[in-house]
Image (spheres, grey):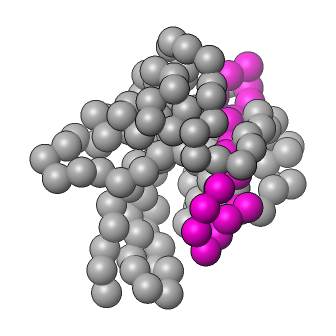
Amino acid sequence: MKTIEVVAAVIVRDAQVFATRRGYGEFKGWWEFPGGKVEEGESREVALVREIWEELCVMIMPEKWLCTVEYDYPTFHLTMHCALCRIVQGRVKLNEHLSAQWLSQEELDTVQWLPADVEGVKEMQATSYK
């Protein structure tokens, strides 16, 4: 089975987490932490900053790695590295997503997360991120 390595930004502001609604593919309409694939020769940090710039037109500061999620989708294995981040420059512009929301801790279970992102949500809920 093919393995895909991705990075995901758990962006926080005022005790809320930024969630994006996927705009393409098999899971279109499901919610996820924004991010994307790590390119060959790229560090996780560089990949994360690049992906968020491409997807949201903002510069982020990764503050700490929260977890690595291993998840088997039907056609591939996903390794997803989740980092707690803050926006340091720019205003969010959605380039790939249908919509986005800032969710409080209590609202995290009100959206349909992608299966791999569910694990990231659980880890984030166990972490103080305010």
Residue at 38% x, 64% y is 79
Residue at 77% x, 38% y is 101
Q: Quadrant of residue 116?
A: bottom right
Q: Position of residue 112 (x, y in %)?
A: 77, 62
Q: Of all residues shown, which one is farthest toward the top?
A: 89
Kindly tell me whether residue 81 is visible in this rendering.
no
Q: Position of residue 68 (x, y in %)?
A: 41, 56
In the image, residue 122 above or below residue 9: below
Q: Quadrant of residue 70?
A: bottom left
Q: Residue 28 in magenta?
A: yes
In the image, residue 24 above or below residue 17: below
Q: Quadrant of residue 77?
A: bottom left
Q: Position of residue 33 (x, y in %)?
A: 59, 47
In the rendered view, does 24 fall on the left or right side of 29? left
Q: Nearer the viewer, residue 52 or 12?
A: 52
Q: Position of residue 38 (x, y in %)?
A: 29, 51
Residue at 63% x, 36% y is 94
Looking at the rendering, in which quadrant would you find the N terminus?
bottom left
Q: Which residues are magenta?
A: 12-30
Q: Residue 22 in magenta?
A: yes
Q: Nearer the viewer, residue 55 or 1?
A: 55
